[in-house]
Image (cartoon, helix red, strand yellow):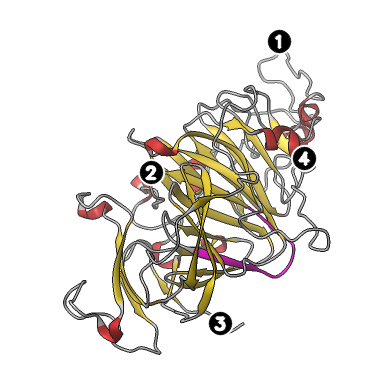
Amino acid sequence: MAELKYIPGFGNECASEDPRCPGALPEGQNNPQVCPYNLYAEQLSGSAFTCPRSTNKRSWLYRILPSVSHKPFESIDQGHITHNWDEVDPDPNQLRWKPFEIPKASQKKVDFVSGLHTLCGAGDMKSNNGLAIHIFLCNTSMENKCFYNSDGDFLIVPQKGKLHIYTEFGKMLVQPNEICVIQRGMRFSIDVFEETRGYILEVYGVHFELPDLGPIGANGLANPRDFLIPVAWYEDRQVPGGYTVINKYQGKLFAAKQDVSPFNVVAWHGNYTPYKYNLENFMVINSVAFDHADPSIFTVLTAKSLRPGVAIADFVIFPPRWGVADKTFRPPYYHRNCMSEFMGLIKGHYEAKQGGFLPGGGSLHSSMTPHGPDADCFEKASKAKLAPERIADGTMAFMFESSLSMAVTKWGLKTSNCLDENYYKCWEPLKSHFTPNSRKPAGLNGVLLP
């Protein structure tokens, strides 16, 4: 595969044209009477026309045929996609899933769309407020087929296998330890090269943005220049009556047929685009004295709600870093949170749970459900010598965190057959170390604490 080219920068106003058609972008205006190369002009709006300039999202596409050239949409089988958050009773327990099983290509071919499985979610796409978490499990490429989402943005986290993604804006290659965002309304198709698995965070009605840095200052966390946008690429390919466009609309799937590839955009300009990001580029901020900073310091992207400081969803990672905090229990502390926390693991092992939480699996700790390190982690960390140490080398865990109380689907609790019924047992060995007669007892390693 030839190396793909990208435009760097998050949320930039960009312009790109396929080098096979130089000058395809109109000069000085968006919608000339006749476009260069006799192309059609089409605007893709990701925000209301009257949004403030700082939040106004739109791009102009110059294409061989407009996207309206298709037969009527008809309802198709939903598979395991759902927006019914009431299909099973609520469950406040700590939940953990073993690695989700990928279908074998020799038994059944499953592409990205047919391999989508909704795990949990909340809210309502009709009112543009909420989110869903999906798992994708596939083993074959999408052939003469594309997908677009009328309900929200997809943040895609591949865990196993590369994704070669065709979009109306160009092509991206997204590998494990990278992410990509396909924003609402953008058509895309995915080629895979092996049995492939990953996670998707879908948000309704808002877009992902970089978190505010506040006292951190101008630099840090995910740097804008490390986000990559594809460059224009088109195919002028005829598929008489044989190209399928799949649309997710109000939580349901619909399909329409058309005669041409939808990836016929010769040039484009704007600030509403797909993009990718390599998680290795994240600039970690951490405590260098004592105690923990809140895990919000690991936020890569956020989708804000109308309440200041409260997110519909945050995408948070726990990358390799140094741990140097003195007089401190260094692993994540025991915690109850008003937010819902879904965690996944791309590779390696998570520091607070060395066993049971595996790459390709996940966990959900719902609003106010207690969680924290397992008994073995607590004992080891309480006795450890507090020298500077590398944490999470060879590992990448992440969290989808939301202010909404998420419901788990029937597939997540039952049909997937991946729910770990013994998760609660990792905390059963915890025992009391209470010393009521000594305020400064010896530590668990026998050394007198200061």
Q: Which residue is mark 3?
A: 3
**Judging from the image, what secondary structure is the residue with disc 3 in?**
loop
Badge 4, how many Cα within 10 Å: few under 14, some, many 20+? some
Tell me the residue at 65%/29% (across/down): 371
Quadrant for residue 44, please give it. bottom left
Would you place residue 127 above or below residue 349 in this image?
Answer: above
Is 33 one of the magenta-colored residues?
A: no
The alpha-carbon separation of the residues under discs 3 and 1 comes to: 65 Å
Mark 1 against mark 4, which lies toward the viewer? 4
Q: Earlier in the sequence, mark 3 or mark 4?
A: 3
Q: Is residue 10 left or right of residue 142?
A: left
Q: Are marks 1 and 4 in contact (CB under 8 Å)?
A: no
Residue 185 or residue 298, whichever sits in front: 185
Q: Amino acid at mark 4?
A: Cys
Label 4: which residue?
A: 418
Q: Earlier in the sequence, mark 1 or mark 2?
A: 2
- Disc 4 is placed on an element classified as loop
Please tell me which residue is depicted at 83% across the width and 59% down the height of the picture: 107
Residue 53 image point, x, y percent: 21, 55
In the image, what residue type sits under mark 2? Gly
Name which residue type carries label 1: Pro
Residue 328 is situated, as x and y percent measured from the top left of the image, at 62, 36
CB-based contact (under 8 Å), mark 1 and mark 2? no
Mark 3 or 1: in front is 3
Find out whether the residues at labels 3 and 4 contact each other: C-beta distance under 8 Å: no
The magenta span reads 188-198
Residue 181 screen position, x and y as percent: 48, 58
Q: Which residue is mark 2?
A: 205
Secondary structure beneath label 2: loop
| Helix, strand or loop: magenta stretch | strand
